[in-house]
Image (cartoon, rainbow, N blue to C red):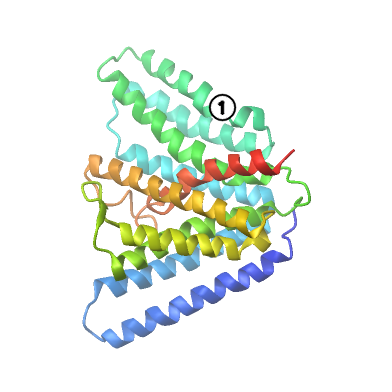
Amino acid sequence: MNAPPEMLWLSFGVAGVLIVATIVGKTLAWRAGECANPVIDNLNQRIFAWWVMVALMAVAFVFGKTGVVLLFGFASFAALREFLTLTPTRQGDHWALLAAFFLALPIQYALIWWEWYGLYSIFIPVYAFLILPIISVLSGDATRFLERIAFVQWALMISVFCVSHAPAILTLPIPGFEGKQLLLIAFLVIVVQGSDVLQYVFGKLLGKRKVAPNVSPSKTWEGLIGGVASATALGAALWWITPFKPWQAAAMSFVICVMGFLGGLVMSAIKRDRGVKDWGRLIEGHGGMLDRLDSVIFAAPVFFHLTRYWFTP
């Protein structure tokens, strides 16, 4: 799969935004001088991490479907590891965990690479969900069995099944858009991640009323409304890289921004339940892989199925 010409202009735009952000971050750090400012330090760490993540996605896009499937497969592996690291397991779960890492995950991504929609859309929620408790029960350990197996099933659902819907966009046969599905993945990532950043900015500038203070004290109604509205406008402005009309791109953007926000809220509740602030330390300034993917996790499957339902034969 060759990169469509629109990708070149999109790359220039993304690079331009990151260059401006880098200049702003460095200027703020220079003005702060030797006075330590954790907010500015974190901002510059996040900007540097974004350069790395954009570079990795660019390399994956160069290699087309294989590169994208491998990139998200690695992201799923890292996310699954982070999730299960916070999960209380027993010796009787070890074979089920091995099956999740080394059977379910690679099979799911192989099915996407083969574009076998009829199986990759049900493989984990049907077959893996049934097989994992069977593997665990054969160990003969019934202690907190339901809780233990639910942890593993949820880890697989969130970290592998939901994330895998991003590369699965490449398999959508959209009339008149053949060979350009990479742009749809870029659209999904830019809008959802842009919404995260803009919610953070609006929340810092205007945020007063908490959405769910007992779950995520940093999320405010002002940040949510400002972030979703501006990211929806961003998505509408990017209609030219999608098969959508401007109003359709705006509607899609609104839906995935809301799903991204709700996904982030759910993942925050899980972290709070586990007693941790971040899922890990894999990405400097961002936390773990799940901290960066939490909004994509809930947005990707909805975006995939809406696009498939409305824009494919």
Q: Residue at x 56, y 27 (%)?
A: 123
Decide which of 227, 279 is in the foreground and name it: 227
The kind of residue on which mark 1 rests is Phe
Q: Residue at x 61, y 63 (%)?
A: 238
Identify the residue position indicated by label 1 in the image: 123
Q: Residue at x 44, y 50 (%)?
A: 258
Relative to 145, is 42 above or below?
below
Q: Position of residue 248 (x, y in %)?
A: 62, 53
Q: Specify whether residue 284 is in view.
A: no
Q: Position of residue 21 (x, y in %)?
A: 44, 76
From the viewer's perspective, tell me whether residue 26 is left or right of residue 101: left
Q: Position of residue 285 (x, y in %)?
A: 35, 63
Decide which of 206, 289 is in the foreground and name it: 206
Q: Specify whether residue 211 is in view.
A: yes
Q: Residues within 10 Å of mark 1 (few under 14, many from 20)?
A: some
Relative to 115, is 256 above or below?
below
Relative to 280, is 140 above or below?
above
- Quadrant (top left, top right, bottom left, bottom right) of the C terminus: top right
Q: Residue at x 29, y 39 (%)?
A: 86
Decide which of 167, 300 is in the foreground and name it: 300
From the viewer's perspective, tell me whether residue 2 is left or right of residue 199: right
From the viewer's perspective, tell me whether residue 142 is left or right of residue 232: left
Q: Position of residue 65 (x, y in %)?
A: 67, 48
Q: Secondary structure at mark 1?
A: helix
